[in-house]
Amino acid sequence: MVLKLNKFIFILAILGGLNGVSQEDGAKPPKVNNYKTDSSFTNFNTLRFNVAKAQITLLKKDGALLVRLKTNTNTIQRLKNAGNIDLATQVERETQLTNKAIIRAYNKEFKFCPVFFFYSDYSDSVKHQHLETIFVDSTLSINSSIVCKASFYLIAEQGSIYDSSLGIVSEAQAPMAIEKGTASKEVAIVVKNRYFIQLHKPFPYYQQGYAIKKYPEFVKKFNKELEDFYTKNSSFVMPAELKEFVY
């Protein structure tokens, strides 16, 4: 049975007495109370609807979804360094089982647009649109024959959604943008742009749930929500002034 991996690693940290074992994405950011005074929230309610319409239209017509898979490399290495080889092997195995289950779920249930899978180690490459030789196949091996030629892509992953400190961020601001909001809950799927900035409503940017054994159900529902949102907005034409916010 595939375990909920973050919980599994947390238990290892307690039972194994391992100082410094943590999620490889880092500690959760501090709560921010005044973030809506940030300039990225200027005209937020006006922009978010049109940005979401543009994102769903581009994703459907000439886009792709890139699914980020965790490696837990830091946790595994810390366990090995501490001499806990058996635990390291178990974390590595559970990570592989989880990733294979996620890939199977998307390949079976996701039809909205082409989907590709990459390890979190290649996040910087994805951010900078360097997509050569980074995608993995169903065996979790990097396969150079898998090529993404999409002109637009979004990122999906299993993780936390945030009470975001970022509003509608322009492409010029995106490389410097830092999420300082509070993580509200763990979800099966959260969708981000290529700078890994969480999207906003009305885009169906997250899917509730977490249990890996139910992941096909989560992906199926996510696919339907994307299709429904696209159907409502398929005639949308993105105005030129919106392009700086859709990347």
Image (cartoon, grey):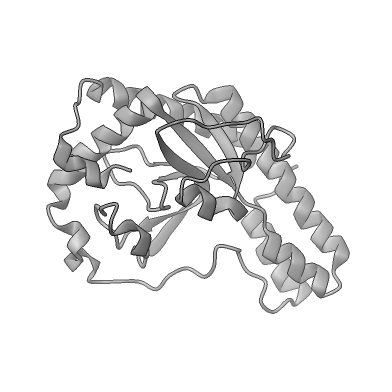
Q: How many marks?
A: 0
Picture coordinates of residue 141 (x, y %)? 73, 39
Quarter placement of the N terminus = top right
Q: Residue at x 60, y 63 (%)?
A: 24
Q: Residue at x 81, y 73 (%)?
A: 81
The part of the image, by quadrant, that contains residue 67 is: top right
Picture coordinates of residue 216 (x, y %)? 58, 30
Picture coordinates of residue 148 (x, y %)? 52, 32
Q: Toward the viewer: 30 or 41?
A: 41
The part of the image, by quadrant, that contains residue 174 is: bottom left
Report whether 161 appears left or right of 77. left
The part of the image, by quadrant, that contains residue 60 is: top left
Report whether 75 appears left or right of 228. right
Residue 189 appears in the rendering = no
Quarter placement of the C terminus = top left
Q: Is residue 209 above or below residue 16?
A: above
Residue 53 appears in the rendering = yes
Q: Toward the viewer: 128 or 28?
A: 128
Q: Residue at x 81, y 55 (%)?
A: 90
Q: Toward the viewer: 137 or 103?
A: 137
Q: Is residue 1 above or below residue 30?
A: above
Picture coordinates of residue 228 (x, y %)? 33, 23
Q: Residue at x 60, y 23 (%)?
A: 108
